Image (cartoon, rainbow, N blue to C red):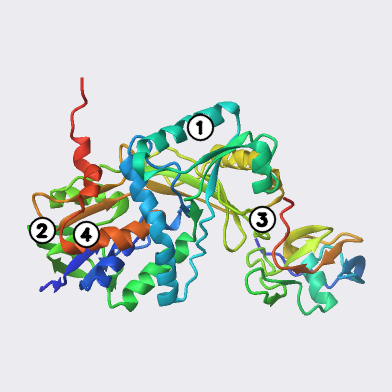
Amino acid sequence: MFRARPDARPATIPVIVEGAEILVPEGASAAAAVLLAGLDAIRETPVTGSPRLPLCQMGVCFDCLATIDGVPNRQACMVPVAPGMRIARQHGARESGA
Amino acid sequence: MNPRRSDAIVIGGGLVGAAIALGLRDHGLDTVLLDEGDIAHRASRGNFGLVWVQSKGLGAPWYQRWTRGSAGEWPALAADLATRTGLDLALQQPGGVHLCLSEEEFEDRAGRMARMQAEAGNHGFDYRMIRAPELRDMLPGLGPSVVGASFTPYDGHASPLALLQALHRAFVAQGGAYVPEAKVTAATAAPHDFGVETPAGAFAAPRIVLAAGLGNAELAPRFGLAAPVRPQRGQVLVTERARPVLPMPTTTVRQTGEGTIMLGDSMEEVGFDIRQSPPVMAEIARRAALSFPWVGDLSIVRAWSALRVMAPDGLPIYDQSERFPGAFTANCHSGVTLAGAHARMLAPMIAAGALDPMLDPFTARRFDVPRAA
């Protein structure tokens, strides 16, 4: 069930967080990229507009919701990075497409 | 051990019991609300949240009137609870639609609505059968499979969890005694003299109201009453939050005040089985996506099942015991819709000691009548 923490890996994968390109390690999550990018928030909540950053990192708290490659409301902590991935801030609730 | 004496005991802390208890307290009765524990079936916590009128009471216009009366009480109930508790019940009553996905469904619906209007007589029953072209202007992103809908202006929706919390908070703030972990284990009944024992103590009062949902089936006979209710399973799916898009609820799809889309309205006769079943969940999702194809782009974030409290004919049961006056039953599967009636119409009757004749058709004695040959 438990695995040893991997050795620190070199940041080799380029992703775009809020328009700025940064390099992150292979296998990192989009949420890790958000934190490495040093943003002050990745979304504002739909109900109160309160700013949020990734918190639980394990798919439970939904505080890391972001627009990833154009798809809103993705749980950034559950999405592994891929080269060229675009991670963008989400303002309030997503559009529904209606 | 001396029991705690009060003016009234309400058994059942769900939407029905809490609404009645608050109404009794507001009429000045020292009221004890006995709730079960977290193992209770809790239909009130699985509710879909419609304040729904249009499909209630075909062949039973008294149920249509009672339901419409409750929907009419809802704005005052929501405003009163908001003032007393600060909780927003997210009540919206813009009218509602029942979508029809085939000509057969549309014709069947049109026939039912026409019969409801005929049965309503002088009380009236406003409805419209609306064809798809006009409906597309009312509901964004309507699917091509929708051929039309029935609309009535009486329908709406609210947050069932906020309602339950607000009823409890208002009851306690008004001086009501809420007692959890108090499943009734023994009971004594005499006219206007009732006693119950629970793990949380013994209680006695000249009035007792059985509002224990499915638990009423077992409780009622101890008080000279009958509540032949059975569980009927309903399943609900909930999507992620989206910006407000649906201007009114449908029978099976509604957007909550927080933005999630709730999908539901399945009915299964499976006893006390509260598991979920993928085929039913898939059918709920399929019909929702036929109704509003854009729902298919939203992720499902929660799903659950719950048990409706169903009488043999699907109507509520209200009675006062003939053998033990002072004992009342209240049973229904529409704890949200009927909350207005329960708090503001039924509770005053119970406080006064007699059910209004308008509730006579809801007696469980209707099930004793032998079928005509």
Left or right position of A9 against B368: right
Lower sequence index among marks 1 and 2? 1
Q: CA distance from mark 1 to mark 2?
A: 50 Å
Q: Which residue is mark 4?
A: B349
Residue B202 at x, y percent in the picture: 16, 68
- Callout 2: SS: strand
In this rendering, is residue B197 above or below B98? Answer: below
Alpha carbon of mark 2 to alpha carbon of mark 4: how far? 23 Å
**Which amino acid does the dot numbered 2 rest on?**
Thr
User: Quarter-wise, where is residue B98 in the image?
Assistant: top right
Q: Which residue is mark 2?
A: B188
> Which one is in front in this view, the residue at disc 1 or the one at disc 3?
1
* Disc with the residue nearer the chain's start (4 vs 3): 3
- Mark in front: 1 vs 4: 1
> Residue B245's mark?
3
Residue at mark 1: B110
The residue type indicated by label 1 comes to: Ala
